[in-house]
Image (cartoon, rainbow, N blue to C red):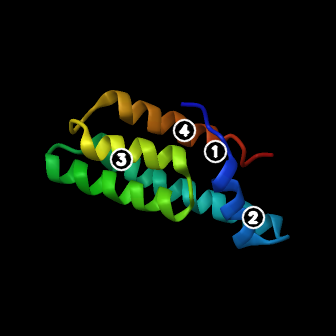
Amino acid sequence: MAYESGSFETALAAAAGEDYALFRELRLAYLESASRQLDLLRRSRCDANWQTAALRLQGIASSFHDEDLSVLAREAVSGAPGDPSVVRRIGMHLDEIGGQIAV
């Protein structure tokens, strides 16, 4: 799944207005929060921890209108705990977003 900016970028722009520094700060805060949940997914050793991290990730993605991450988080919620494929794809998605911070 390739990262498409769409709604996510629109949501950030609406929140930041013309303030590019705020736009960057919001993007960074989003990435830090989502990355924290991804780390918890990676370290989950039981179904409950996996579900909690996946649901939190889904909430973060939804609040920032990141549809691609929402889809991946829903996949994690409904899939097998510890699924390395979904963890890898979530990581790749966040890396793609993070690569745009330096712009």
Q: Residue furthest right?
A: 18
Looking at the image, is mark 4 or mark 1 nearer the viewer?
A: 4
What label sits on residue 74 in the rendered view? 3
What distance separates the C-alpha of mark 3 from that of mark 1?
Answer: 21 Å
Residue shown at 48% from the left, 37% from the top = 91
Label 2 residue SS:
helix
The earlier-in-sequence mark between 4 and 1 is 4
Residue 21 lies left or right of residue 28; in this view the side is right
Amino acid under label 1? Gly
Q: Disc 4, disc 1: CB below 8 Å?
A: no
**Residue 70 appears at what percent x and percent y?**
45, 50
Callout 3 environment at 10 Å: few (<14), some (14 to 19), or many (20+)? some
Label 3 residue SS:
helix
User: Mark 2 — residue?
Assistant: 13
Callout 2 environment at 10 Å: few (<14), some (14 to 19), or many (20+)? some
Residue shown at 56% from the left, 58% from the top = 65
User: Mark 4 — residue?
Assistant: 93
What distance separates the C-alpha of mark 3 from that of mark 4?
Answer: 14 Å
What distance separates the C-alpha of mark 2 from that of mark 4?
Answer: 20 Å
What label sits on residue 98 in the rendered view? 1
Amino acid under label 3? Arg
Residue shown at 68% from the left, 49% from the top = 6
